[in-house]
Image (cartoon, grey):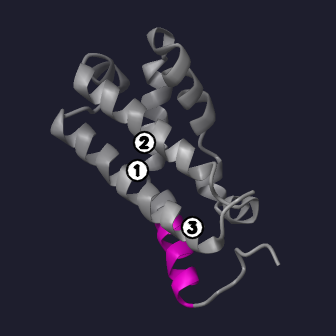
Amino acid sequence: MKKSLNTDKQCVEKILKYIQNIRQALDHENVKSYESLDDTISAKFAVTQLITNIYELSKHMQETSLSSLKEFGKIRLRTTRQIASHDYASIDFKLVYTICLKLIAKSVSDELSEFIKEDEDGDSKHDGQ
């Protein structure tokens, strides 16, 4: 059974922290392209693990909450997580870099922040009722 909306809010808060960690990993290693990501082992491991963590958190959320996150929902987290977990040697770091850029996009962060704000304001549109 899926967890409650309170857990959805907690998941989104953690997802936002992981997105910030992706930004920091890319900035710390001065990654500006998929080629530079592919050449930087610490950044490769960091961002693939963070994408995996984000995907795993999203699996604990209610479908109604996930479907309300349109920008976040467009990101192919599952595919990258599957490859990172089961076939790391075949990861396409162009895809991983593209996913990182989508995750750190302002539209995704704003959408996730708004989800938290709506929950704090008592908005129940995410509760599936």
Instruction: Look at the image and tell me whether residue 79 can be seen.
Output: yes
Q: Report the residue at 48% width, 16% height from top.
A: 91
In magenta stretch: residue 35: no
Report whether 94 appears left or right of 64. left
Quarter of the image where one finds residue 22: top left
Secondary element type, mark 2: helix
Q: Which residue is mark 1?
A: 104
Q: Given the image, on which type of amino acid does mark 2 rest?
A: Leu
Give the residues in magenta.
110-121
Q: Residue tagged by mark 3?
A: 7
Q: Residue at x 54, y 50 (%)?
A: 57
- Position of residue 77 relative to residue 108, above or below, is above
* Amino acid at dot 1: Ile
Q: Earlier in the sequence, mark 3 or mark 1?
A: 3
Residue 37, above or below 109: above
Q: CA distance from mark 1 to mark 2?
A: 5 Å
First along the sequence among labels 3 and 2: 3
Is 116 colored magenta in this rendering? Answer: yes
Look at the magenta stretch and give its main secondary structure.
helix
Q: CA distance from mark 3 to mark 1?
A: 22 Å
Judge depth for marks 3 and 1 and give the one in front: 3
Question: Mark 3 and 1 residues: CB-CB less than 8 Å, in contact?
Answer: no
Do the numbered discs 1 and 2 sit on residues whose CB atoms are within 8 Å? yes
Give the residue drawn at x 59%, y 66%: 8
Query: Neighbour class for label 2 at 10 Å: few (<14), some, many (≥20)?
Result: some
Q: Which kind of residue does numbered mark 3 sit on?
A: Thr
Q: Residue 23: x percent and y percent?
A: 30, 47
- Quadrant placement of the N terminus: bottom right
Residue closest to the far right: 129
Residue placed under numbered mark 2 in the picture: 101
